[in-house]
């Protein structure tokens, strides 16, 4: 009989440990860290995983880059990326981490408590709203800021071979060194919390955080022309500025939350706005009298119109900026051409950011719109309403996907066409155009592929923000992989024998080959390779190789293949989007609440 | 016509049984109270009835053989879930239009009249309404669908006494006027007798009792007498629960008829619904359905 309690203790080990913890007098150490981890562990773990993936990529690629760095900057991009497009994606993805922290962790730390009403519980325990907020911020920052700093140091080690060629301010290096990255991480976290306190909603908070983040980049220091001696002073100045901004954001958040009752509901300011489209009772009676055409599509629009209007609005602002600047550009193309061509093509140029941001649009908009179609219905249990009305689950989700997909697809095509018009005077429509992803077909294709992926992930994870984050990670990595490795191989390459690849073509490879274009092997390869490496002009190279019965072979994709490549990529993306949409319908059809 | 019919219905969530081997056939035209303690399986049964869950085994059909969740079943069944989840960002007017768009039949004029009667502002956001108003809005939408069967999961939980009274009044009026069947789950025993004419009692995932309220009451009696006389109880009387000690014991028994003789020394009284329900809830093993069971009190029942 005396053994029984021990046996029970073994079986219910977890429970008894929890009971022991609860019965221990005093409060445990790092209690706020525990609370935050319990509440937001998945979000923090995903961000840490993101850092880990980026760190693994740096460690994996470092030996190749160190070798390439000795060859010189000219070959750096070729060896790293195999194509001119890919350069935009890796540093973009790494720079996006603090933004994702703002949108995913910062916003969630505050918005979910306000949205679900659990703040009413939290603020009536042992903490005031201010201590609760500071505790959460401190706990999240304790995990993320040191991680960001460690990653920044790793990046400094990874980038060091390029300092002689690209300088400390090349690529996006400045923002990824430890002090600046730690500062951006903290600023992202606090900015997200402020956005959540202003909107009191997760989705709106994320949009506000994104917009504010874009504006926040006005405080980015350093430019390619800055002397190297100013690098570290500027790093610490950047850190101090961002920490000061973080303190400001935190103060604003505390101030906003002190006057907020801990119950869910619309902010009073927004509630009092007399929206003109709200139906008056007499008009409403007429509207309710009969079921209109395309009723399910209308219902889908009604549910998602706020998000879709914001998405179309963002694309509209992008199009308006293009239209306004494009008028000048079209008026004086000759004067502005060299500047813009430089800005578009050179990753070291600061203005290159203007190209990076629109490239991110289809990913961000697609991911959040797609996740919003499926995730919130599960989060708010509105599936119990929608699935018990007169239409089946499959029809309802199909109508939502088609309606939102059509709106986003058309808006993306419109924005892409405006970009093509804007881009016209500068770069001839060539396959090497670094803005390949901004042409209408591919722009819309990526938007819809992200939309489909996020919708499916939302149906699986039943959480909008989790789905959007995982979608962004997956699609940005896929987009980079596609641009760097798969896109140059959409069609069999052309070869140039004993001559350089034509201007404007996408260079793929250069090797000594047999007269039929096949690569040499063995000893012949080594001897011909040495002849090739000596250089000395095409005639000299051809003669030197000719003595070895070899030729110079360059493989490339001709400049004229821009539109075939656009068609291939768009068709692939649309097929993927359709498959993901069908999978979403299948999942929802089988889902229960 | 049966509005709800189950056969061997079971539902498990990750190995934990919520419902086990439920057999039930509820005829049309009743207001059915689905009663049981927390975690008994009431919500699961209702969610299965409207197609929000799928059975682990067995079958469930609504409105004479329609599969829950199918287009035919969705058109005839209205549902208001616990806490009445709706689109919080929408205005009340927008929510009504949403419901109109999602249903082939929707009596918009009725819904609008109900909303105006209650005094819910059309421009208000659904998320900003009180819990009671949200429940009333959800009921108005469900009724405007003109369903043959209305399923309500804990509809009274968030209502104040006045709103509860009004809610039940609307429900009764709609049921009487339309011949609509209603199944609702509730903990509020005091209201049961007033509004429901059919009782289904669920306990620990099993159907413990099901039948018309008058028939159920007629089949039970409360006996009061000395404990020494217990062995002399006729075998036709099946005790559900024995309470009290000392000089007097109180028994709730199932009986073939109210006029049948009881044991000497016992006084018999008609059972009251609330008392009957409580007795069954306290004895999860007791059942009035076919098949012998052993009650928790150790008294064999049939």
Image: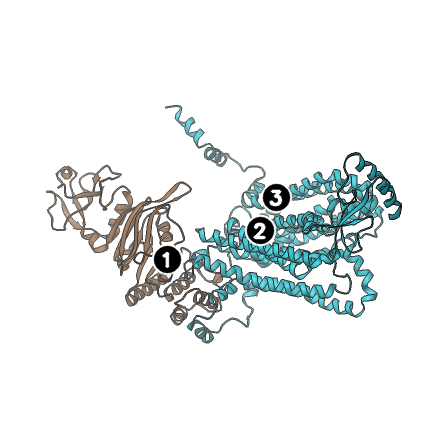
The letter of the brown chain is: B
Q: Which residue is mark 3?
A: A139
Question: Between residues A31 and B220, which one lies in front from this camera angle?
Answer: B220
Q: Nearer the viewer, mark 3 or mark 2?
A: 2
Whole-percent x and y of residue B302? 20, 42
Image spot of residue B98 (x, y percent): 46, 65
Q: Position of residue A3 (x, y in %)?
A: 40, 24
Q: Are marks 1 and 2 on the same chain?
A: no
Q: Identify the residue under disc 2.
A: A108
Check the residue under mark 2 and report the chain it is in: A
Q: Nearer the viewer, residue A305 or A194?
A: A305
> Is B90 positioned to the left or the right of A389 in the image?
right
Question: CA separation, marks 3 and 2?
Answer: 14 Å
Residue at the top extreme of this rendering: A2
Residue under numbered circle 1: B155
Q: Alpha carbon of mark 1 to alpha carbon of mark 2: how far?
A: 31 Å
């Amino acid at each position: 009989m005396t053994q029984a309690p021990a046996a029970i203790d073994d079986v219910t080990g977890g429970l008894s440990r929890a009971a022991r913890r609860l019965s221990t007098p005093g409060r445990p150490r790092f209690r706020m860290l525990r609370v935050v981890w319990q509440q937001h562990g998945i979000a923090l773990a995903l961000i840490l995983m993101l850092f880990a993936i980026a760190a693994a990529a740096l460690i994996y690629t470092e030996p190749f880059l160190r070798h390439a760095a000795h060859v010189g900057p000219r070959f750096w991009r070729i060896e790293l990326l195999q194509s001119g497009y890919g350069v935009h994606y890796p540093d973009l993805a790494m720079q996006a981490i603090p933004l994702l922290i703002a949108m995913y962790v910062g916003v969630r730390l505050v918005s979910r408590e306000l949205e679900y009403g659990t703040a009413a519980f939290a603020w009536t325990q042992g903490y005031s709203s201010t201590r609760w907020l500071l505790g959460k911020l401190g706990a999240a920052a304790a995990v993320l800021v040191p991680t960001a700093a460690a990653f920044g140091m790793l990046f400094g080690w990874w980038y060091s071979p390029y300092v002689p060629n690209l300088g400390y301010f090349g690529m996006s290096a400045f923002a990824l060194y430890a002090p600046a990255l730690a500062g951006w991480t903290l600023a992202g976290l606090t900015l997200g919390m402020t956005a959540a306190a202003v909107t009191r909603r997760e989705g709106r908070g994320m949009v506000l955080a994104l917009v504010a983040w874009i504006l926040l980049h006005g405080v980015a220091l350093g430019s390619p022309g800055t002397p190297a001696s100013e690098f570290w002073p500027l790093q610490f100045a950047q850190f101090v500025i961002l920490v000061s901004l973080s303190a400001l954001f935190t103060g604003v958040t505390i101030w906003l939350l002190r006057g907020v009752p801990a119950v869910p509901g619309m902010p009073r300011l927004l509630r009092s706005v007399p929206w003109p489209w709200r139906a008056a009772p007499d008009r409403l009676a007429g509207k309710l009298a009969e079921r209109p055409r395309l009723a399910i599509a209308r219902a889908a629009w009604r549910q998602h119109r706020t998000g879709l209007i914001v998405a179309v609005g963002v694309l509209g602002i992008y199009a308006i900026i293009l239209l306004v600047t494009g008028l000048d550009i079209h008026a004086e193309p000759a004067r502005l051409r060299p500047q813009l061509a430089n800005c578009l093509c050179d990753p070291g140029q600061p203005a290159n950011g203007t190209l990076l941001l629109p490239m991110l649009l289809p990913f961000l908009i697609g991911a959040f719109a797609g996740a919003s179609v499926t995730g919130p219905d599960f989060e708010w249990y509105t599936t119990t309403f929608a699935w018990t009305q007169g239409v089946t689950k499959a029809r309802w989700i199909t109508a939502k996907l088609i309606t939102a997909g059509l709106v986003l697809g058309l808006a993306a095509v419109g924005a892409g066409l405006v970009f093509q018009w804007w881009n016209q005077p500068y770069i001839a429509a060539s396959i090497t155009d670094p803005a390949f992803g901004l042409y209408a077909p591919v722009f819309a294709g990526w938007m819809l592929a992200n939309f489909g992926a996020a919708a499916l992930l939302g149906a699986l994870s039943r959480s909008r923000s989790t789905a959007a984050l995982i979608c962004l990670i997956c699609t940005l990595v896929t987009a980079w992989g596609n641009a760097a490795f798969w896109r140059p191989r959409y069609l069999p390459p052309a070869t140039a024998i004993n001559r350089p690849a034509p201007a404007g073509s996408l260079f793929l490879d250069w090797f000594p080959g047999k007269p039929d274009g096949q690569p040499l092997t063995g000893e012949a390869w080594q001897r011909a390779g040495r002849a090739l490496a000596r250089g000395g002009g095409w005639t000299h190279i051809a003669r030197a190789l000719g003595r070895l019965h070899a030729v110079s072979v360059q493989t490339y994709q001709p400049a004229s293949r821009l539109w075939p490549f656009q068609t291939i990529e768009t068709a692939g993306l649309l097929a993927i989007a359709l498959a993901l949409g069908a999978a979403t319908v299948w999942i929802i059809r089988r889902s229960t609440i | 016509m049966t509005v709800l019919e189950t056969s061997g219905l079971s539902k498990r969530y990750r190995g934990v049984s919520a419902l086990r081997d439920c057999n039930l056939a509820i005829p049309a035209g009743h207001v059915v109270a689905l009663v049981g303690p927390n975690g008994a399986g009431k919500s699961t049964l209702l969610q299965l009835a409207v197609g929000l869950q799928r059975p682990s085994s067995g079958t469930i059909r609504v409105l004479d053989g329609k599969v829950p969740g199918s287009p035919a079943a969705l058109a005839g069944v209205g549902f208001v879930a616990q806490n009445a989840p709706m689109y919080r960002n929408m205005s009340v007017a927008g929510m009504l239009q949403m419901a109109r768009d999602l249903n082939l039949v929707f009596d918009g004029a009725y819904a609008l009249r109900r909303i105006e009667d209650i005094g819910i502002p059309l421009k208000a956001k659904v998320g900003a309404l009180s819990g009671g108003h949200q429940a009333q809005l959800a009921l108005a939408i469900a009724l405007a669908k003109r369903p043959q069967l209305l399923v309500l999961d804990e509809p009274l939980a968030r209502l104040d006494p006045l709103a509860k009274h009004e809610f039940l009044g609307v429900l009764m009026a709609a049921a009487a006027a339309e011949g609509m069947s209603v199944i609702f789950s509730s903990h509020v025993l005091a209201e049961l007798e007033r509004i429901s004419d059919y009782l289904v009692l669920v306990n620990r995932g099993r159907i413990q009792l099901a039948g018309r309220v008058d028939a159920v009451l007629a089949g039970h009696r409360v006996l009061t007498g000395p404990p020494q006389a217990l062995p002399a109880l006729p075998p036709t009387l099946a005790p559900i629960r024995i309470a009290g000690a000392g000089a007097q014991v109180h028994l709730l028994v199932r009986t073939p008829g109210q006029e049948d003789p009881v044991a000497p020394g016992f006084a018999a009284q008609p059972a009251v619904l609330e008392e009957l329900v409580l007795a069954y809830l306290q004895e999860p093993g007791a059942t009035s359905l076919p098949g012998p069971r052993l009650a928790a009190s150790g008294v064999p029942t049939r």
